[in-house]
Amino acid sequence: MKSLVAAFCLLLLAAPAAAETLNVKVGILRETHSRETISILDIPAADDTLAGVLLGAADNNTTGKFTNQTFEATDVRLEEGDDVIAALDALFEKGALFIIADLSPERLLAASERAKSKGALLFNVSAADDRLREEDCRANVIHVAPTRSMLADGLAQYLIWKQWRRWLLIKGSHPKDELLAQALRASARKFGAKIVEERLYEDTGGGRRSDSGSVQTQRQMPLLTQNAPAYDALIAADESDVFGGYLPYRTWDPRPVAGSAGLMPTNWDPAHEQWGALQLQNRFIQTFRRLMNARDNAAWLAMRMIGEAATRTASNDPEKLRLHMLGKDFSIAAFKGVRLTLRPWNLQLRQPILLSDGRIVVSVSPQEGFLHQTSELDTLGVDQPETKCRLK
């Protein structure tokens, strides 16, 4: 018996020690978004974006129990005048080399330059500017949020499928509104729609909810839209949320409204429940007592991409995870009917575009009949032969 006990002890001593837990530290760098919205329902929550990351971390840690990995998130919220570099350095000091960024284009590019010296990897979850994936693309920035061109193409495909080819375009007076208008013009050319006329809505300032009552708006919108050439749909380019929400049911001619109001293209909508999305929506509501918005979902998806790549590579090295995400073996489930992959030429996540009226998801693009030699998802946005991106 003594010899058996001795042999068992020798086996225990010879057995390899349990693998050390691999810790993946993720930083959240997010701006404070304006509370000046047309609808009180659109006022951003205090935990916008953060909630999506936390739910993604919880999902990753569920898998991590079996793969001996842990995921933790550190949040930094920026006010308007705060220094993004100082905030980023604070995250680096805490060991976070994966940064989920809800930032303006300028701050995102500044953060990218700083992150190079640390070998850190950024995930853009809100900035829609096409230039960030094109002439200003960076090798250390993965884009989870769709571009304006992807959103515009998703909307345009549906309007063309409906045979609503003649558009009246009304744009706001802010630079972001012009960028969206440019994307819509490009989509019209790409898919064969015609913009019969463009009109400008000048933002004169004031409180959007308090200064624009229903009586005043009921008089303004018909004047803005009257005497237009014959058109099938009114398209609003109003990223600044100044006038678009006032257009439905107030136009001079009885026409559908789309774009920044009415039928809106988005990467996520609280009404989305297909392909198992309802379970994600329910978990989010139960945890945070509110609905999941587009920024929340992009942040959740970024965290899940980190988790999936860390599991597959058994690593927390940003470069190893980046190379895996760019490879043919990487894909991520996102409750959108197909598994999502990265475009290797500009690090943009391929994804369907939901078309929502604010109550239900009306349709999902790419639409039937819009074909592509590689992936139908590449009918949305700038395709590889057209790209200006030279990753650096």
Image (tube, helix red, strand yellow):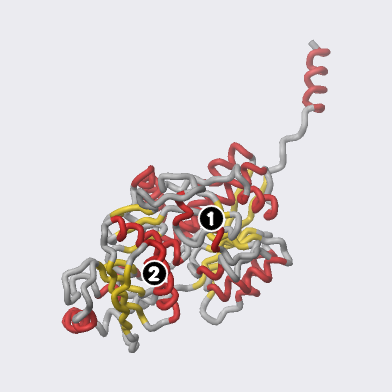
Percent x, y of residue 239: 39, 74
- Does 68 sit left or right of 373 as displayed? right
- Regarding mark 2 in the picture, which secondary structure is present there? helix
Gap between marks 2 and 1 measured at Cα: 27 Å
Residue 83 in which image quadrant: bottom right
Q: Position of residue 366 (x, y in %)?
A: 39, 53
Q: Circle 1 is placed at which residue position?
A: 302
Q: On the image, which quarter does residue 385 sit in?
A: bottom right
Residue drawn 56% across the image and 54% down it? 343
In the displayed structure image, the side of residue 300 where residue 266 appears, left or right: left
Q: Where is residue 1 in the image (x, y as percent from the top left)?
A: 79, 10
Please tell me how crowded label 1 is: few (under 14), some (14-19), or many (20+) other residues with Cα within 10 Å.
many
Q: Quick one: label 2, few (<14), some, or many (20+) residues within 10 Å?
A: many
User: 291 or 230, which is in the foreground?
Assistant: 230
Residue 391 falls in image quadrant: bottom right
- Residue at (33, 86) in percent of width and height: 202
Label 1 sits on a secondary structure element that is helix
Q: Depth check: 205 or 164 in front?
A: 164
What residue appears at the point 64 percent right and 60 percent down from the top-left corner?
121
Kind of residue at disc 2: Leu
Q: Tag 1: residue type?
A: Ala
Indicate which label's residue lies in the foreground, 2 or 1. 2
- Residue indicated by mark 2: 184
Which quadrant, please, contains the C terminus?
Answer: bottom right
